[in-house]
Image (cartoon, grey):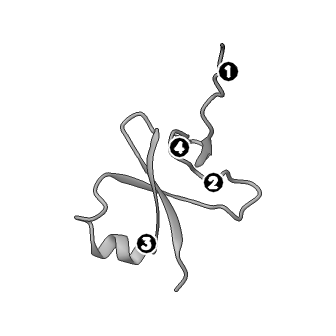
Amino acid sequence: MSAQYFAKIDDNNKVIEVAVVTAEFMAANPERYPGTWVETFFDRADKRYAGVGFTYDPATQDFTEPPIIPIRS
């Protein structure tokens, strides 16, 4: 069984954690993985791999990266 990638999202669909674990292990250990977890993929051209700070869109089942804020000096 190969590893899978899951993003934990908060109530605003913001990614707050990413874990490499199988779905079976997560299901067998819910106390270790509380909250809402969504599978993410790094090897699919049609989906974006989630990172902390990204936003999950349930309609497209994809993630968007946070905006880049320019640093002013």
Mark 3 neighbour class, 10 Å CA radius: few under 14, some 14 to 19, many 20 or more = some
Quadrant where the image shows the C terminus: top right
**Circle on res. 58:** 4
Q: CA distance from mark 3 to mark 2?
A: 17 Å
Return the disc, 1 or 3, that comes first in the chain's sequence. Answer: 3
Return the disc, 4 or 1, that comes first in the chain's sequence. Answer: 4
Image coords of residue 35 (percent x, y): 31, 52
Residue identified by numbered label 1? 70
Residue 61 in the figure: left or right of residue 38: right
Return the disc, 2 or 4, that comes first in the chain's sequence. Answer: 2
Mark 1 neighbour class, 10 Å CA radius: few under 14, some 14 to 19, many 20 or more = few
Q: Secondary structure at mark 1?
A: loop
Image coords of residue 1 (percent x, y): 52, 86
Q: Name the kind of residue labelled 4 in the image.
A: Pro
Q: Nearer the viewer, residue 7 or 38?
A: 7
**Residue farthest to the left, as pictured:** 31
The reply to whether discs 4 and 1 touch (Cβ–Cβ < 8 Å) is no
Residue 63 in the figure: left or right of residue 31: right
Q: Nearer the viewer, mark 1 or mark 3?
A: 1
Residue 52 sits above or below residue 42 on the image: above
